[in-house]
Image (cartoon, helix red, strand yellow):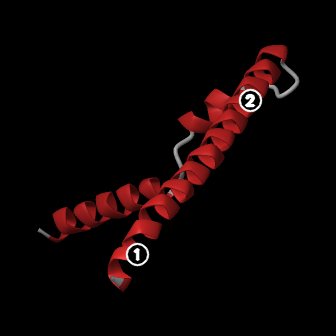
Amino acid sequence: MKSKNRSLRQQIEDVASQSAKPPLHGRSALQGVHPQDPFVQAHIKELNGTIGALRQEKFELSAQVKKYRATVDHPQGSLNKA
């Protein structure tokens, strides 16, 4: 009984120590990729372009929302005073 208890505790410790370490498969996949690779650079440029376009769209939509809020708030303010 004691030996079984010890072996089970050892298994728990082994699992706990393994789960505390980060997985290695994520890092090994990135080791073969070099930032100097033209494909990677082209992909980064494309992603940066997409990010820029999304930021611009967000800016335009925010301005549009502010405009609509002002359009709605003005008549509401007149109704509240009356």
Quadrant into which the C terminus falls: bottom left
> Would residue 68 appear left or right of 54 to someone viewing this image?
left
> Disc 2 or disc 1, which is closer to the eye?
1
66 or 28, nearer to the observer: 66
**Where is residue 54 drawn, in percent x and y?**
63, 38
**Where is residue 35 drawn, in percent x and y?**
83, 28
> What distance separates the C-alpha of mark 2 from that of mark 1?
44 Å
Q: Is residue 21 above or below residue 79?
A: above
48 or 22, nearer to the observer: 48
Name the element at disc 2: helix
**Where is residue 70 drawn, in percent x and y?**
51, 63
Residue 33 in sight in this render: no
The image quadrant of residue 45 is top right
> Would residue 62 appear left or right of 76 to someone viewing this image?
right
Question: What number is the disc on residue 49?
Answer: 2
Spot the residue most to the top.
Answer: 39
77 or 3, nearer to the observer: 77
Whichever of labels 2 and 1 marks the residue nearer the N terminus, that label is: 2
**Where is residue 74 drawn, in percent x and y?**
47, 68
**Residue type (three-letter) at the residue carrying disc 1:** Ser
Spot the residue most to the bottom.
Answer: 81
User: Which residue is located at x 68 percent, y 37 percent?
Assistant: 51
The image quadrant of residue 12 is bottom left
